[in-house]
Image (tube, rainbow, N blue to C red):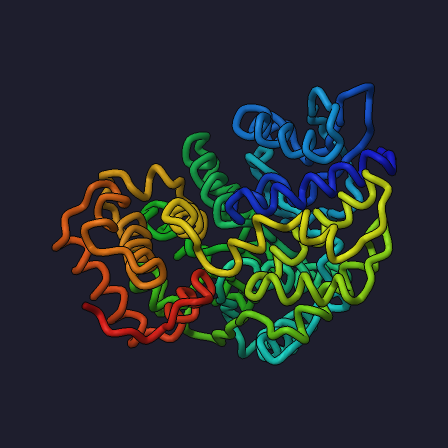
Amino acid sequence: MPTDTSAHRTWEAALGRLQLQIARPSFDTWLRGTVGLSLEGQTLVVGVPTTFAAEWLERRMQGLIEDAVTAVVGDLQAVAFRVSGSTSESTSAVAVTPAAPSPAPPLRSAGLSARYTFDSFVVGGSNQLAYAAAMAVADGSGSVYNPLFLYGSVGLGKTHLLHAIGNRALAAGRAVAYVTCEQFTNEYLWAIRERKTEAFRQRYRAAELLLIDDIQFICGKEGTQEGFFHTFNALHDAGSQIVLTSDRTPAALPLLEERLRSRFEWGLMADVAPPDLETRTAILASLADRAPVSVPQEVLDFIAASVPSNVRQLEGCLNRVTAMAYFTDVPVTIDLARQALGTTIAQEAGPSSPKAVIAIVATHYGLSPAALVSGRRDKPVATARQLAMYILHQSLHLSPDETGQIVGGRDRTTVLYAIKRIASRIKLDPGFAQEVAALTPATATTTNAP
């Protein structure tokens, strides 16, 4: 279905806002690859890949999405989702051979974004190894890197590299299966419920290249880990390539079974670190080539200096600036950029309030702020809560008693224990130290616990 230019630009600008508000796994699973199709009166029609995706967005994100679109165009009344056989930015992933049985349609069909290629990936000192390894795997010459495990904090380009591998391999005629960890889990549970486990196994084991994004979300899901363990072994034994991304190293993944942890460390682990200023500027220049308005170099420099750690936020910030200029018909200037990004720039300077700390840490771990301060004691929530306590104490200089009250009314002893535990882990685990530094740029990564 052809897309209307105005609808496409409106939705791209709205996605820029949503990208800064929604946890990355949810954004990648449900919104990446969607496209603005048309403006019908005061309703924006958005193309999605499946009926299930349309229903999920209507049920879970309708209000948030309409708020984002209204912030862009002002007078919109509604957003409607329509299943579209093709989008401007996605291609279907191939995961079965003609002779292999396939299950009934999965909960959400996977797709590779055509935007994410090696040509559009900006290489710098922070990602050279990951880029070189990804290129080798995509070309079929990196068989010793099996699995290839790409790790780093949120928004640094891991997903871009994963899609780039898939796109190049598809172009070479290889059978590729790309899914997020959330989608793999959903399909596995669907197969069990519908008694289609054999078809599920055939679907994934027919792949020459399996790409799974955000594998950290398999932690704590014993049934899914069991299913993935056997899938991993079958593919690895058959010589198929596996590529995984995660926000931290296998050793730092909580509730990951030891047998999976050891397999994730078999091949090559390559980190994707925050880009330096020069690389951030180059990334913005590349993104600006697709913007609906011209962006002066001094504005690119301003945005690059204001958003020091996150490539995804760089893209979202540029989208907000160019959307404001496009819809208000004014030129892009530093003053306009400062107006469009005021809140984001303040947040990137370091957490400025307890509420901001809770929100940032919760989003990083794929949780809601309410869950972080709740009485839940499962390990992922407990880890996020301890990190929030550490940042509140070290970065905002709150007392242990003040910190405890903010994080669900914990007592002083609990807070001091959390601070010491996080400080100790930072010293012993460079990957975790990098993770903490990305969340709190102003916080030193080696501090003495009180």
Q: Provide residue 293's location: percent of width, then percent of height.
A: 85, 51
State which quadrant residue 426 falls in: bottom left
Residue 37 vs 320, above or below: the answer is: above
Q: Which residue lies furthest to the front in this view?
A: 335
Q: Residue at x 34, y 46 (%)?
A: 221
State which quadrant residue 158 falls in: bottom right
Residue toward you, 56 or 439: 439
121 sits to left or right of 256: right
Q: Which residue is drawn at 24% across and 74% down?
A: 448
34 sits to left or right of 59: right
Q: How many marks?
A: 0
12 sits to left or right of 356: right
Locate the N terminus by quadrant.
top right
Visible residue check, residue 255 = no
Q: Provide residue 177's location: percent of width, then percent of height.
A: 61, 53
Residue 53 vs 277, above or below: the answer is: above
Residue toward you, 416 or 220: 416
Q: Residue at x 49, y 63 (%)?
A: 153
Q: Provide residue 157's location: percent of width, then percent of height.
A: 60, 63
Q: Provide residue 82's location: percent of width, then percent of height.
A: 72, 26
Visible residue check, residue 91 = yes
Locate the C terminus by quadrant.
bottom left
Residue toward you, 417 or 95: 417
Q: Residue at x 60, y 46 (%)?
A: 19
